[in-house]
Structure formats: structure tokens, C-alpha cells
Image (cartoon, grey):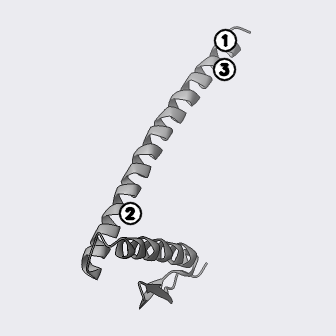
Amino acid sequence: MNKTPVPVSLSIMGKDYKIACPPEEQNDLIQSARQLDTQMRQMRDSGKVAGADRIAVMAALNLAHELQMLKSQNAQLNQTLAECLAKMAHKIENVLENK
């Protein structure tokens, strides 16, 4: 697979950006830019945050917070899954031992 970065054109709040990105990551980068653009436009349109710099920082904080929450949820789910698998393995061992 080609790992050579290629330029991807993105538009965020009416400004164009060219970002070098490996081809296999292009769709994720485009989706991320769309999500950021949507969030920044919503903040701007709400009138609660003024100035592109402040809007960008607030959008970044919101997205970072969302990412942290998802990481925490993922860690909890992984722990729960590991506990369930350990219990299941223990039950299987007990059944096999009692045969």
C-alpha cells in the first residue's frame, strides 16, 4: 500500500487548507475536517463565541473532551469484556474438568 502523503484540500469556515496525508487516511481526514467545520460554524452562529481563534480553541476543546470521554468508555468496555471472557474461560475449564 502506498504510504506516500498526498495533498488533501479541506475547507474549514470558508478557509482552504492543503494537508499532506497518506492515501489510506484521506477519508478520515476529510470527515474530521467536516466535523470541525460543523462545530465551528455552530459556535459562530450561536453568537456565544466571537473571533475565529476563540471559536477554533473552543471547538478543539469540545472535540478533545468528546475524545477523552470515548477513550474512558472504551477502557471501561474493554475491562468489562476482559472480565466476562475470564469468567467464561473459568466456566469452560470447570465444565471440562468435571467430565
Badge 1 amino acid:
Glu
Badge 2 amino acid:
Leu
Q: Is residue 66 left or right of residue 25?
A: left
Q: Position of residue 85 (x, y in %)?
A: 58, 30
The span from disc 2 to disc 1 (Cα, nearest Å) is 50 Å
Of mark 3 and mark 1, the one earlier in the sequence is 3
Tell which of 49 and 75 is nearer to you.
Answer: 49
Disc sitting over residue 92 in the figure: 3
Q: Position of residue 1 (x, y in %)?
A: 61, 78
Give the foreground label among 2 and 1: 2
Identify the image quadrant of residue 24: bottom right
Give the foreground label among 3 and 1: 3
Residue tagged by mark 2? 63
Tell which of 21 and 43 is nearer to you.
Answer: 43
Give the foreground label among 2 and 3: 2
Q: Secondary structure at mark 3?
A: helix
The span from disc 3 to disc 1 (Cα, nearest Å) is 9 Å
Residue appearing at x 61%, y 24% in the figure = 88
Residue tagged by mark 1? 97
Residue appearing at x 69%, y 8% in the figure = 98
